[in-house]
Amino acid sequence: MHMKICKTVEQMRLASRTAHRAGKRVGFVPTMGALHEGHLSLVRAAKARSDVVAVSIFVNPTQFGPKEDLAKYPRPFERDCELLENEGVDLLFAPSAEEMYPKGAVTWVEVEGLSQKLCGRSRLGHFRGVTTVVSKLFHIIEPDLAFFGQKDAAQAAIIRRMVHDLNFPIEIVVCPIVREPDGLAMSSRNAYLSPQEHKSALVLHRTLTEIQSLFAHGERNSARLIEAGKKVLAQEPGVRLDYLGIVDPDCLEPITDLQDQALVAVAAFVGSTRLIDNLVLRAI
Ligand code: PAF
């Protein structure tokens, strides 16, 4: 079957309601396009758990700061469509900015507290833009399940909280990070990196694995683990740390007593490209 491309809210809502009326479970993968294997892993997870798979491609202006990369964000729409067709996606929602944000829209969805943590501290208003657009997409598509990547662990925590607080009848599925063979976490922004910057960017993963290795050898002091991670990162000139934290994966509060599940999250600028990565600490 051919993938149906919906450009308007009305077309998308109709397509999704038609699927529901036929008794189908709709799985939804929200994206900003420039698709890579990470996105495709979400599509495959959605296919495995739903009858109809809907994907959205929308570069959401409200989650970019005034000095960020909205204008230059890659938009290879034809190629993205081909990739999604090949994965057997049923419905693609690709609205314009005017369709999603008609003139005069003034309503926001904000998850207080969590939205100011990790990336929310350095990207003011970012998560408010994410939760607003994801709420709108949820209302338009009304999926049974929605799939997000663990690479943006803070986003996943914030969406889980929003779905719980606002009673969205949607199961949130978070899928593992997909990495390049050299360890770099897949991201649409990797396309900005020169070959030298790509090499430098590997330090993010090395920082995380150093912390994991010390943790596995018994280190339970957060501050010492973070110091050790910062030392690894500092060895790479051209990489500037934004944050490195060890936090609770649900409330995103720093953890000092490392007995429970802890998320190590890092963000850094490689040249002018801001990248993020994370892992959940394991005792073995
Ligand atoms: O993770 C992303 O690509 C975006 O934040 C999302 C969830 C598609 C909302 O614009």
Image: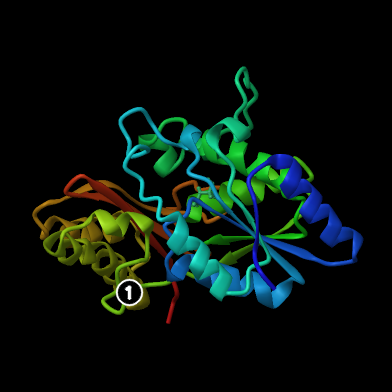
As displayed, is residue 117 above or below residue 202?
above
Q: Position of residue 13 (x, y in %)?
A: 77, 47
Q: Position of residue 49 (x, y in %)?
A: 72, 74
Name the side, left or right, on which 63 lies relative to 26: left
Q: Residue at x 22, y 66 (%)?
A: 202
Helix, strand, or loop for circle 1?
loop
Q: How is the image coloured?
A: rainbow
Camera-nearest residue between 121 and 221: 121
Camera-nearest residue between 274 and 268: 274
Q: Position of residue 52 (x, y in %)?
A: 74, 67
Residue 73 occupies which quadrant of the picture? top left
Does the closest atom of ligand 1 sit within 8 Å of the Cβ of label 1?
A: no
Q: Residue at x 32, y 54 (%)?
A: 189
Question: Looking at the image, can residue 138 be seen?
Answer: yes
Question: Looking at the image, can residue 169 be seen?
Answer: no
Q: Residue at x 40, y 55 (%)?
A: 76
Tell me the crowding category of disc 1: few under 14, some 14 to 19, or many 20 or more residues within 10 angstroms, Cα based.
few
Name the side, left or right, on which 92 lies relative to 202: right
As displayed, is residue 85 above or below residue 92?
below
Camera-nearest residue between 172 and 53: 53
As displayed, is residue 248 above or below residue 210?
above
Name the side, left or right, on which 200 lies relative to 218: left
